[in-house]
Image: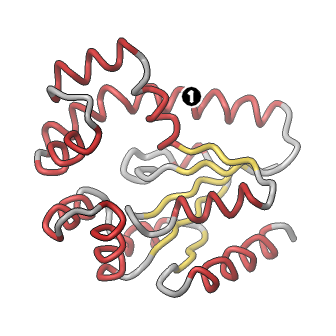
C-alpha cells in the first residue's frame, strides 16, 4: 500500500482534503497536528519562548511570516520533531500496510521530502482565491496573507513537482467530487 504525500499552499484546501479522506475511513497523518502536539512539550515551549518570545500561536504566526530569520529559527525547532514523527509513522505503515497512508505536509517540497512518498498530491487554487480564503479564515489583513503565501513555493511550482494536482477553485461540492475522482483513479 502506498504512502501519499499531500501538499499545497496555505488556504488551498489541504485540511478539507484530509478531513474528507478521514470521513471516508482513510489513514491520515497531518504535520499541523504534529506541530500542535510539539507545542505542548515543555522543552519545545522553552525553545520557542527563547527564540520568538511568546507561545501565542497567532502572535508567532505574525512574527515569523514577517521575518524570514525568525521563521527559519522556528522551523529549526519544530521541523526535526515533525519529520521524525512522520518517518516513524511511515516506517510502521510500510512494515504492516493495510491501506494507503496519506501524509499532509504543507512544506513537503520546500523541505525536500518528496522522496519519502510513493506519490505526491498537490492541492492548488488561484492566488486571489487563496488570499480571500486566508484573510477570511484567519481574520488577517491582505498584506499578512500575502507574506504567508509568498513564504512558500507558489501553487504553480508545487503543481509542476507533484504527481497529481487537484484544483480547488470551486465550491466544496466540486472539490469533494474532484477528491472522489482522484480516489477512484488511485484505487484502480
Which corner quadrant of the image does residue 175 belong to?
Answer: bottom right
Relative to 76, residue 187 above or below: below
How many marks overall?
A: 1
Query: Residue 151: x and y, percent?
Result: 24, 56
The residue depicted at 67 percent of the width and 32 percent of the height is: 89
Relative to 187, residue 33 above or below: above
Position of 48 compared to 35: left or right?
left
Query: Residue 114: x and y, percent?
Result: 53, 50
Position of 129 compared to 60: left or right?
right
Q: Residue furthest top?
A: 43
The residue depicted at 58 percent of the width and 34 percent of the height is: 86
The residue depicted at 44 percent of the width and 35 percent of the height is: 35
Which corner quadrant of the image does residue 69 belong to?
Answer: top left
Q: Secondary structure at mark 1?
A: helix
Position of 66 compared to 86: left or right?
left
Residue in front for this viewpoint, 63 or 151? 63
Query: Residue 118: x and y, percent?
Result: 67, 52
Position of 62 compared to 23: left or right?
left
Task: Tell me the quadrant of the picture where the C terminus can be found.
Answer: bottom right
Query: Residue 173: x and y, percent?
Result: 64, 83
The residue depicted at 32 percent of the width and 67 percent of the height is: 134
Relative to 185, residue 118 above or below: above
Q: Which residue is mark 1?
A: 85
Please name the colour scheme applied to the rendered image: secondary structure
Dot 1: within a 10 Å radius of its alpha carbon, few (fewer than 14), some, or many (20 or more) residues?
A: some
Residue in front for this viewpoint, 180 or 172? 172
Amino acid at each position: 500500500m502506498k504512502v501519499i504525500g499531500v501538499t499545497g499552499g496555505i488556504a488551498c484546501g489541504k485540511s478539507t482534503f484530509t478531513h474528507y479522506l478521514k470521513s471516508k475511513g482513510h489513514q491520515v497523518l497531518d504535520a499541523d497536528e504534529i506541530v500542535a502536539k510539539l507545542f505542548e512539550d515543555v522543552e519545545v515551549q522553552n525553545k520557542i519562548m527563547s527564540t520568538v518570545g511568546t507561545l501565542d500561536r497567532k502572535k508567532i504566526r505574525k512574527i515569523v511570516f514577517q521575518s524570514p530569520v525568525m521563521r527559519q529559527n522556528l522551523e529549526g525547532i519544530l521541523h526535526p520533531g515533525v519529520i521524525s514523527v512522520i518517518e516513524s509513522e511511515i516506517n510502521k505503515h510500510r512494515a504492516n500496510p493495510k491501506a494507503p497512508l496519506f501524509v499532509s505536509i504543507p512544506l513537503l517540497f520546500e523541505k525536500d521530502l518528496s522522496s519519502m512518498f510513493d506519490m505526491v498530491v498537490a492541492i492548488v487554487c488561484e492566488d486571489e482565491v487563496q488570499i480571500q480564503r486566508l484573510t477570511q479564515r484567519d481574520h488577517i489583513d491582505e498584506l499578512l496573507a500575502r507574506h504567508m503565501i509568498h513564504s512558500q513555493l507558489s501553487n504553480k511550482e508545487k503543481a509542476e513537482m507533484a504527481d497529481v494536482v487537484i484544483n480547488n477553485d470551486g465550491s466544496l461540492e466540486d472539490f469533494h467530487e474532484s477528491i472522489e475522482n482522484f480516489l477512484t483513479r488511485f484505487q484502480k
